[in-house]
Image (cartoon, rainbow, N blue to C red):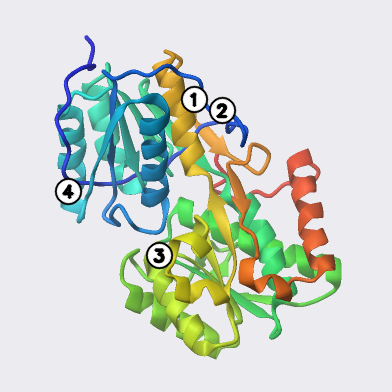
Amino acid sequence: MTRRGFIVPAVAVSALLLAGCAPAPEEDARPSSTAAPDYCARMVTNSGGLEDRSFNQSSWEGLQQAATDFDIEVDAIVSTSETDLAPNVEQAVGTGCDFILTVGYELADATTAAALANPEVHFSIVDEQVAGENIKPVVFDTAQAAFLAGYLAAGVSRTGIVATFGGGNQPPVTLFMDGFVDGVAKYNELRGTAVRVLGWDKATQDGVFTGDFEDTLKGKTTTERLLDRGADVIMPVAGQVGEGAAAAILEHGESSLIWVDNDGYDSLPAQFRPILLTSVLKNTQDAVLAIIDADLKGDFSNKPYVGTLENSGVDIAPFHDRAGLVSSELAAGVEELRAAIVAGILEVTGPNTPR
């Protein structure tokens, strides 16, 4: 049975994140699939919405690029609450589209159920590893890139105290925090310093969490407490909550923000650019593009896509307006660590490292 050719516009969104092991496309290469006007794809967001300045937004940008490159029809169904998730996945399947992309761990159960009931449809989920013959997880080893960000933060800190906090204690969140803590520890090891990290204990897998990914006021008050304790570089891993962190840091006047998922210099309001040290990036756009390219060619696989530093699935962003804080020695140290991780000389790992 084919799902091609029957298209109904979608009107709501819900999200899910996950990845696979295929290498990311080269930066100067563009997939070569022929146009398939009878092929359509739908995306379901989580409750963070389409313009969450995070993985929903990045996933949607990848789907939009696929529409341009391959001449296919795409749409997004936006979820506004947890009760929307399963109905929105059902709605996406009901459009008759060939490919359904869900974003975030909250969509795992709904994606699994829909894939089992519709074996002729291909599914992919972002930031969650879900098993299924017709489900391709899209996950990212963000600890590798966050390790570089932690090393950088330790090198920039004036107070000797940096911090991180999350929206919830879930593997896609704590993986960032593990890498950040390990990067600070590596800086201390190599430089003989004693920079401290507030907000996360890797050994106990416990730390500071706001309890959601949308309430910017929680992000602001949490960050204010960390600033009061002396932290001068802070990495929120909390979606839109992180914008509250940015507001607190901007008011503070002397501290720096590290954003996650995409380059906050581009996705956050311009007023926050002066405080942005770097961002820990997930290259979700290219992952989505590569998966749809393979599906159009008849090469869909349920093998997870895992983004790493080696395949450019993860990275850190440029230092932009904060470049003056980063000495040439510190920047060189970051690049040396990157090379060591890519070469397999230095292993960055934790309990939630994707495989």
Q: Amino acid at mark 4?
A: Asp
Would you say the residues marked 4 and 1 are in contact, meaning their CB atoms lie under 8 Å apart? Answer: no
Say which element carries label 3.
loop
Residue under numbered circle 3: 167
Residue 84, labelled with which disc? Answer: 4
Label 1 element class: loop
Q: Position of residue 318 (x, y in %)?
A: 64, 60
Q: Earlier in the sequence, mark 4 or mark 2?
A: 2
Going from N to C along the chain, the mark reached first, 3 or 1, is: 3
Q: Residue at x 45, y 18 (%)?
A: 33
Q: Which residue is mark 2?
A: 22
Considering only vertical position in the picture, is 71 above or below 140? Answer: above
Question: Can you tell which quarter of the image residue 353 is in?
Answer: top right
Using the numbered discs, state the Cα–Cα distance from disc 4 to disc 1 in whole angstroms: 28 Å
Q: Nearer the viewer, mark 2 or mark 1?
A: 2
The image shows residue 337 at horizontal and vertical percentages of: 78, 53
Figure check: 354 above or below 170: above
Neighbor class of circle 1 (other Cα within 10 Å; few <14, some 14-19, many 20+) is some
Q: Are marks 2 and 1 in contact (CB under 8 Å)?
A: yes
Q: CA distance from mark 3 to mark 1?
A: 28 Å
Depth check: give the residue in front, 15 or 59: 59
Which of pointers 2 and 1 lies earlier in the amino acid sequence? 2
Mark 4: secondary structure: helix
Residue 283 vs 210, above or below: the answer is above
Amino acid on which disc 2 is placed:
Ala
Residue labelled with disc 1: 303
